Image (spheres, rainbow, N blue to C red):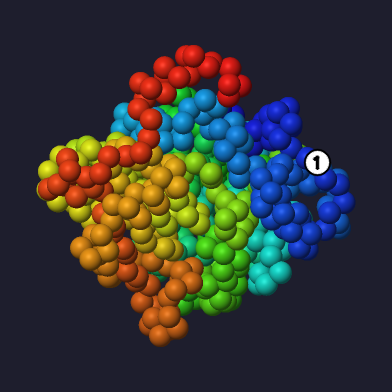
Amino acid sequence: MFDDFRSFVERLDEKGELKKIQGADWDLEIGTLTELSAERQGPAFLFDQIKGYPSGYRIASNVVMTAKRQRIAFGIPEEMAEVEVIRDWKDKFRQCRPVPPREVKTGPVMENVLKEEKVNILKFPTPRWHEKDGGRYIGTGVVTITKDPEEGWVNCGTYRVMIHDEKTLAFYASPGKHAVIAREKYWTKGEDCPVVMCFGQDMILFGMSTMALPWGMSEFETAGYMKGKPIDVIKGPITGLPIPATAEIAVEGFAPPPSIESKAEGPFGEWTGYYASGARNEPILRLKAIYHRNEPILHGQPPIKPPANTWYPIPLHTAVTLWNRLEVAGIPGIRGVYVHGPGNRIIAAISIKQGYLGHAKQVGTLAATMLSGGACSGRYIIVVDDDIDPADLGSVIWALTTRCNPEDSIEIVRGFLTSPLDPMLPPEKREKRDFTTAKVIINACKPYHWMKDFPPVNRASDELRRKVLDRWPNIFR
């Protein structure tokens, strides 16, 4: 694993996974090249000599949008099957022993310190990623750091961040996010919310910030556990919040209550593939300081229209916590969990060894309540038998079309939290800020009460396959 973002980018270069581009325009050109490469499963990009900016102010994009690069980022063995990757991380999380961050006096992020009149976030070549975006979004591959004022724990989350002007950023986050809950506690007390944002950081910390960890579980401490050593942090001179010592770019500031100040944010082309949320007044962040490394690299992680993958091909950010929560709830027989669809958030496939009547329905109902935290999360829950690999969407669809009776195997349950990013929220619900949706729970398992009489599967047995391959060992090489 890597201690900073640039070490990861250098490794991609060594592996032939990176293409360097000089002279691109921050206004749409970088975004379009990133989109085209993502659609083609092409290389990661490192942009330099960006139009209007000095050499050395760089942007790295498309860095984890293939399974190979995701495996490099998080130290995942190349030969490990995808559902086994989810199982491995699930087991690690179950055994998590938090490793608190280590406070240090300084670090590379403090190579350049800008305060007061020198604060100017526009010094960094932030792209306008999509044609209809309402502004330049510096926060795509971002870690936003807040602290619960009552409980004292520190949260890291990934939320979109638009530049308003040289000293002001947007601070958008969907309802229910941990940062939203924390900042509202400050506002209720009539206080501004202290915030740190980092734009280019240790990939494990970034990975933790994209996961739906339980309330009170620190991403810093979990990242330290996953790395086997503490994350080095510097106490923010202004906010007191921890700043990752090896971050490429970091800012400190305060978010005032929206009743005091808010600004129009958006629209922004999102991971659902739409501009669903439009432009509306959202909270802001008043910048008090900027810190950055020499020759900083901005992490660009812009949403791309599906089926190009916005985040990770292997859904560590959604499937790991879902599997763990099902097991913690005491549900037996879980054989695999995977999440498909845009953002790897919308279609959850859960493989079970059926043990009793109602087992599949129980799993599906619980999973629908547990997969949450964003637009459309867990809109479709599909429960399949243990002979189905949940990571193989083709096999899941086969089970859905041959083992699901639409008359009695599909249920629609209303009233789940979604987000303004949900393109299916009707205008009247948006107007009332009623961000709720229905979820579909599908039992695609063989009917339990006549499972033994279900038609056999047309597939060569494992034993016969081994015997034939032993006789013809080189035929598929």
Kindly identify the residue that appears in the image at 37 percent across and 35 percent down.
459
Residue placed most toward the observer, 117 or 266: 266
In the image, residue 189 above or below residue 288: below
In the image, residue 382 above or below residue 1: below
In the image, residue 281 above or below residue 204: below
Quarter of the image for the N terminus: give it. Answer: top right
Residue 214 percent across, percent down from the top left: 33, 47
Kindly identify the residue that appears in the image at 42 percent across and 19 percent down.
466
In the image, residue 217 above or below residue 307: above
Residue 272 percent across, percent down from the top left: 52, 63
Kindly identify the residue that appears in the image at 44 percent across and 43 percent down.
392
Question: Is residue 262 among the parts visible in the rendering?
Answer: no
Question: Is residue 138 among the parts visible in the rendering?
Answer: yes
Q: Is residue 302 left or right of residue 98?
A: right
- Residue corresponding to mark 1: 20
Residue placed most toward the observer, 367 or 127: 367
Quarter of the image for the C terminus: give it. Answer: top right
Kindly identify the residue that appears in the image at 41 percent across and 63 percent down.
376
Secondary structure at numbered mark 1: strand
Q: Amino acid at mark 1?
A: Lys
Q: Is residue 389 left or right of residue 32?
A: left
Residue placed most toward the observer, 169 or 318: 318
Local crowd size for mark 1, using a 10 Å CA cut-off: few (<14), some (14–19), many (≥20): few
